[in-house]
Image (cartoon, rainbow, N blue to C red):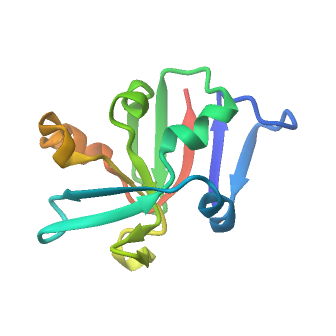
Amino acid sequence: MLQIGGAIHAPDGARFIELDSAALRALPQQTVTTHTPWHDGVVTFSGPRLWDLLEPLKPAGKTLHLTALNDYSVDIPLSDLQRYQPVLAWQLNGKALSVRNKGPLFLIYPFDAYPELHNPLYYGRAIWQIKMITVK
């Protein structure tokens, strides 16, 4: 279950929305094939682009605050979503991500498509085990 709240316009005026895995899988799916610091070789992630998920909610902020299952959190500029189009991955190499292997949701940037992403700043923004997104 993914919770999205903050400066959004939920369809029913609610303060937040919740999406289950079926709702995430119903969105248009994208793939990112890239190297990461956490995997050997090139790997392929699949899931919806985070912007495709948020755009219908008309996010009114400039920053996303993502929180993981262990309460680790990271702030990401909303501009990253349009510039780099990171994917909210739920699959790795065709298999669903489990909590044990950084799932159920892992924000993946297309590291190999943009050489400037190969640095600690963007690796730090690639948060896994995401449970909540707050638009600020």
Asked if residue 136 lies left or right of residue 34, the reply is right
Is 131 displayed left or right of 70 in the figure?
right
**What residue is drawn where x is 56% and y is 21%?**
61
Q: How many marks?
A: 0
Q: Is residue 79 above or below residue 70?
A: above
Q: Is residue 67 left or right of residue 112?
A: right
Tell me where residue 108 appears, x and y as whole percent: 34, 52
**Residue visible at 43% across and 74% down in the picture:** 97
Residue drawn at x 21%, y 57% is: 34
Q: Position of residue 107 (x, y in %)?
A: 39, 52
- Picture layout, residue 117 above or below residue 19: above
Quadrant hosting residue 84: top left
**Which of the 4 image quadrants contains residue 83?**
top left
Decide which of 19, 42 is in the foreground and name it: 42
The quadrant of the rendering that contains the C terminus is: top right
Say which quarter of the image contains residue 11.
top right
x, y percentage for residue 38?
A: 19, 65
The residue under the point 56% across, 50% down is 132
Which quarter of the rendering shows the N terminus?
bottom right
In the displayed structure, 14 sits above or below 41; it is above
Q: Could you tell me residue 76's position as x and y percent?
A: 39, 34
